[in-house]
Structures are given as structure tokens and as C-alpha cells.
């Protein structure tokens, strides 16, 4: 592609994955957010909870100064605590709702344009009940977000049978779910992730085309799925080029090509497309981020 990728998308980085010491809302948040804020390659950043209100305000000051678009990932609020938004126990479901509502409040506080979460585990025997609980929870979150402003609420599609084992999930159910929620709420969409496609046993076309009208946000990354004995197996988001990984330049080219074909990447309202990459073992986070930038540059040149 001869045109700049910035004409079609806002290139982002998921802060709490690139710098995983911050994923629980603590750690070197200010230093690492600053690294992204001073890097002109990125015009979007995705953050998660920041437990210290004073640190949160410092981050907000940086973001206000940075001219970056901000999104908020509520996934760590569930994944690091074991909460489940579609739990069949009502008290447990309400706990998950409560922490995500707190996340929506934080998202508004730091000026985020979007808020993301994920569905929880389920069993086949009670799958429909879990699905209905998820729809109910999502409607509550969309209503809450709408009462506060214009943030877009997104559910990120995860694997259903390998690692996170989330109900959403395979593309057919993701489509049904988005249709059900969007009947009532226009502030909802789906988040897709190249890293998750191998885990979902779906190609870019299989995974994206059926839900094209609902996609609001996209991630780029890698996964290892060939064998459970392999390093970084599952939903661990290793760098591009990781041994036995499924995604590299060619797979990113195909993913971007489909996102262009379905109109998600566009010049009128360029969406956020963020790297979700995480250092493995003692890898240097900054080098992993540089790796991702090189891969995207090469993939875009091949479009």
C-alpha cells in the first residue's frame, strides 16, 4: 500500500501487555506510559485500571498532552481476579458488573473513547443460561456507559476451548450476541484480535466477515497453538516471529487485507488497531515493541 497506514487507522499499543508489570493496576505505570506517549509511531494507547488516584491523574495529564486516542481495557479486572461476567450465580455476576462499572468510571476519568471486557467461562450443559447472563450483563454495562457519556463498549472475542475458554467465542455465537445487544444499544461493538484467530480455529475471513458490521476495535499479535508443551502455548501474546508462532508478516497482511475489504479500516473515521504483544520470559519489553512496529511496517508495505 502506497498510502500511509495512519490514513486508515490509529496505530495503538496495549500498555499493560507490553509492560505486564502494570497489569494489576500497580507497578511502573508512569514510566512506561511515558515511553509510549513520546513515541510518535503510536497515536493510540490502551490502558487498564490504575489503582492509585494520584497516579491516574498524572497519567491523564500525560495523555492530555500527548494527542493520542485513549481506550480502556477492562479485561484485567476480570482475568486477574477470576470474576466472570456471565456467572450463573447472581452474586458473582454482580461482582463482575461492579468492577467493570468502576472501570467505566476510570475510563471516563482518563478520557478514553472505548471500554473493553471479555466473556467468562461456561459449561456446555448450561451454555444457553450463560449466554443469557452475558447478554443481561452487557446491556447493564452499555446502559451504565451511556448514562455517563459517549464511550463505546466492546466485547473482545476470545478462545472458547484452549486457554481463556470464554463463551464468546466462535464467530456464529459472536454474531448472535452482537445482534442481540445492538437491538437495544448503539454504543456496543465487538473487538477482534489476530492473536486469537488460531485459538478460535478460524481464518481472518471466517472470523471477520460474518461480524463485519459489529467490529469496533482490532488487535494485532501472535499465538502458539501447535502443542501444549511448547513455550508460550495458549493466549500469551508472544512477539511476532516467536518459535512455533502462528502469526508473522504474511498473516498480518491477510488480516489487514480483510479489515480493509470489509471497510473497517477506512479514511473517514480511522479506528484503533493496537498491538497486543507481551514479552516472554526475560525478553526486553522495548525490543518486543520495536519488533511489532517493524512487522506492521513490512505488512503494510505488502498490502
Image (tube, grey):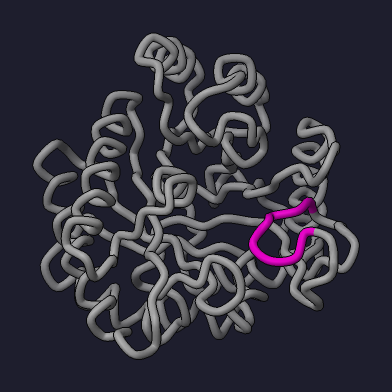
Residue at 30% of width from left, 60% of height from top? 85
Q: Is residue 181 above or below residue 191?
A: below
Visible in this render: residue 67? Answer: yes
Task: From the viewer's side, name the closer residue of 260 and 200.
Answer: 200
Residue 80, percent across and down?
48, 45
Q: Is residue 180 left or right of residue 25?
A: left
Residue at 54% of width from left, 49% of height from top? 9
Q: Is residue 49 above or below residue 195?
A: above
Numbered marks: total: 0
Residue 223, percent across and down?
72, 64
Task: From the viewer's side, name the closer residue of 11 and 230.
Answer: 230
Visible in this render: residue 270? Answer: no
* Quarter of the picture holding the C terminus: bottom right
Task: From the viewer's side, name the closer residue of 77 and 30.
Answer: 77
Q: Is residue 180 above or below residue 50?
A: below
Which secondary structure is most common in the magenta stretch? loop
Residue 92, percent across and down?
24, 57
Residue 260's quadrant in the figure? bottom right
* Quarter of the picture holding the N terminus: bottom right
Residue 140 forms part of the magenta stretch: no
Q: Is residue 204 left or right of residue 99?
A: right
Residue at 74% of width from left, 51% of height from top? 296
Residue 225, percent across and down?
74, 74
In magenta, the rendered stretch is 232-239
Q: Residue furthest bottom?
A: 125
Residue at 57% of width from left, 41% of height from top? 14
Amino acid at each position: 500500500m502506497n498510502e500511509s497506514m495512519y490514513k486508515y487507522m490509529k496505530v495503538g499499543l496495549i500498555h499493560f501487555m507490553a509492560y505486564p508489570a502494570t497489569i494489576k493496576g500497580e507497578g511502573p505505570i508512569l514510566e512506561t506510559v511515558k515511553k509510549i506517549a513520546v513515541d510518535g509511531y503510536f497515536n493510540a494507547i490502551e490502558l487498564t485500571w490504575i489503582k492509585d488516584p494520584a497516579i491516574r491523574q498524572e497519567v491523564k495529564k500525560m495523555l492530555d498532552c500527548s494527542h493520542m486516542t485513549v481506550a480502556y481495557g477492562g479485561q484485567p479486572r476480570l482475568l486477574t481476579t477470576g470474576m466472570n461476567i456471565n456467572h450463573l450465580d447472581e452474586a458473582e455476576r454482580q461482582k463482575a458488573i461492579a468492577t467493570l462499572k468502576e472501570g467505566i468510571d476510570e475510563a471516563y476519568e482518563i478520557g478514553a473513547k472505548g471500554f473493553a471486557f471479555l466473556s467468562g467461562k461456561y459449561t456446555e450443559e448450561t451454555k444457553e443460561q450463560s449466554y443469557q447472563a452475558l447478554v443481561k450483563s452487557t446491556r447493564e454495562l452499555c446502559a451504565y456507559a451511556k448514562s455517563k457519556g459517549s464511550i463505546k463498549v466492546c466485547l473482545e472475542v476470545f478462545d472458547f476451548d484452549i486457554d481463556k475458554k470464554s463463551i464468546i467465542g466462535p464467530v456464529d455465537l459472536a454474531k448472535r450476541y452482537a445482534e442481540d445487544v445492538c437491538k437495544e444499544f448503539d454504543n456496543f461493538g465487538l473487538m477482534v484480535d489476530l492473536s486469537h484467530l488460531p485459538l478460535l480455529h478460524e481464518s481472518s475471513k471466517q472470523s471477520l466477515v460474518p461480524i463485519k458490521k459489529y467490529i469496533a476495535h482490532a488487535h494485532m499479535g501472535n499465538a502458539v497453538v501447535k502443542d501444549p508443551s511448547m513455550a508460550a502455548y495458549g493466549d500469551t501474546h508472544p512477539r511476532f516471529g516467536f518459535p512455533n508462532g502462528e502469526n508473522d508478516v504474511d498473516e498480518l497482511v491477510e488480516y489487514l487485507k480483510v479489515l480493509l475489504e470489509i471497510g473497517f479500516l477506512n479514511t473517514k473515521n480511522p479506528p484503533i488497531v493496537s498491538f497486543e504483544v507481551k514479552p516472554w520470559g526475560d525478553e526486553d519489553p522495548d525490543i518486543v515493541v520495536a519488533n511489532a512496529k517493524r512487522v506492521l511496517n513490512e505488512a503494510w508495505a505488502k498490502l
